[in-house]
Image (cartoon, rainbow, N blue to C red):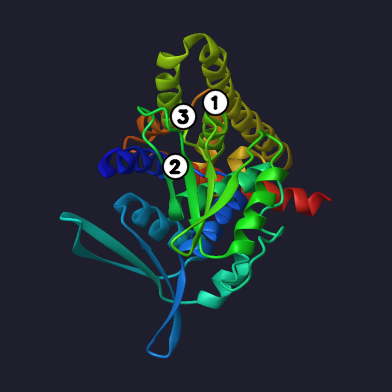
């Protein structure tokens, strides 16, 4: 298979993952932790330690830059350089986290020399999903589904870390994913060959549309065996959206009971809470569109996501006071 075909589908999966909204801060932190653990380096500049992350994908670079800056309120600096690889022009993006490197690594439970994966950063299925997503963004690839040679892999430097990664997969309760380890040019490759496990992995990391594309090619080969799985994926995606909406509504009702929505000082957040109660099945994009009409200017899906994070923080504060 041509290299660009493999890269093409890998790029599609990764760009879908970074286009998702991450309402759950623990899940987002798990993603960042995995990406930094696999991809990150500590560099010294002007006598200070900085975190260096590199990627060949501009959307991944912007995602990391934006979320690290927002979550930790730190300054980041991004540069890019053009280079030629096998007669093909490529761009390498470098993100420098310029302050509080040690504090960020500690918060994300990242030790670049530690081979274990901390249970403080991955402690349930939601955070495992985030960690697997970050790992795939850092060093994952997948064969194009047009071939019957199904293969998804994540490459790491340490053998023991690879073994801990398999233990992490075994702890996930939502799907059965049994990977294997091999070596290649001094690296350790964690891989799946079974198409069902690859599909499950794509769902777990949030690449739902890519999974559907993957399944469509399988359907062409074996329609009868694939039909039920495609339906299940649709239902799983719908259930995930409904579960998220239900959780938000429960928290909003609690906030309204304890504080009152009209007493929320952030007017946008107060409006969003009211709109969610009125539109219990609306997606993030639909809520952004409704709010834009209400306010008279455009509100992005990303803004909606950040507001829901603020809602979660408010809910946790109120709940903590009443315990």
Residue 252, can we see it?
Answer: yes
The residue most toward the top is 224
User: Looking at the picture, how far across and down is residue 43, in whole percent?
Assistant: 42, 80
Q: Which of marks 1 and 3 is nearer the N terminus?
A: 3
Residue visible at 77% across and 53% down in the picture: 320
Rounded to the nearest angstrom, the CA distance separating label 1 from label 3 is 11 Å
Residue visible at 63% across and 53% down in the picture: 165
Mark 1, secondary structure of its residue: helix
Residue 293 occupies quadrant: top left
What residue is pinned by disc 3?
Answer: 211
Residue visible at 65% across and 45% down in the picture: 169
Say which quadrant the N terminus sits in.
Answer: top left
What residue is pinned by disc 2?
Answer: 17
What residue is pinned by disc 1?
Answer: 237
User: Looking at the picture, how far across and down is residue 253, in whole percent?
Assistant: 68, 33
Q: Residue 215 carries which label?
A: none
């Amino acid at each position: 298979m041509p290299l660009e075909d493999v890269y093409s589908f890998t790029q599609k999966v990764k760009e879908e993952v970074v286009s998702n909204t991450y309402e759950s801060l623990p899940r987002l932190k798990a993603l960042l932790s995995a990406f930094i653990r696999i991809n990150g380096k500590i560099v010294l500049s002007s006598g200070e330690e900085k975190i260096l992350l590199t990627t060949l994908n501009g959307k991944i670079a912007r995602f990391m830059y934006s979320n690290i800056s927002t979550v930790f309120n730190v300054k980041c600096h991004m540069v890019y350089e053009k280079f030629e690889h096998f007669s093909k022009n490529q761009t390498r993006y470098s993100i420098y986290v310029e302050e509080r490197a040690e504090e960020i690594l500690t918060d994300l439970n990242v030790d670049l020399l530690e081979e274990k994966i901390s249970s403080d950063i991955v402690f349930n299925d939601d955070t495992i999903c985030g960690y697997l997503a970050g790992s795939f963004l850092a060093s994952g690839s997948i064969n194009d589904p047009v071939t019957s040679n199904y293969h998804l892999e994540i490459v790491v430097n340490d053998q023991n870390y690879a073994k801990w990664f398999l233990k992490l997969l075994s702890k996930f309760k939502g799907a059965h994913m049994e990977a294997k380890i091999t070596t290649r040019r001094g690296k350790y490759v964690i891989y799946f060959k079974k198409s069902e496990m690859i599909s499950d992995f794509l769902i777990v990391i949030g690449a739902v549309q890519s999974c559907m594309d993957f399944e469509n090619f399988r359907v062409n080969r074996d329609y009868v065996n694939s039909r039920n799985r495609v339906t299940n994926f649709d239902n799983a995606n719908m259930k995930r959206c409904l579960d998220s909406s239900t959780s938000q509504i429960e928290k909003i009702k609690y906030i309204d009971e304890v504080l009152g929505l009209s007493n929320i000082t952030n007017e946008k957040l107060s409006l969003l809470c009211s709109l969610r109660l009125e539109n219990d099945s609306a997606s993030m994009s639909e809520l952004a569109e409704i709010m834009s009409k209400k306010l008279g200017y455009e509100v992005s899906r990303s803004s909606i996501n950040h507001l829901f994070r603020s809602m979660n923080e408010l809910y946790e504060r109120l709940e903590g006071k009443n315990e």
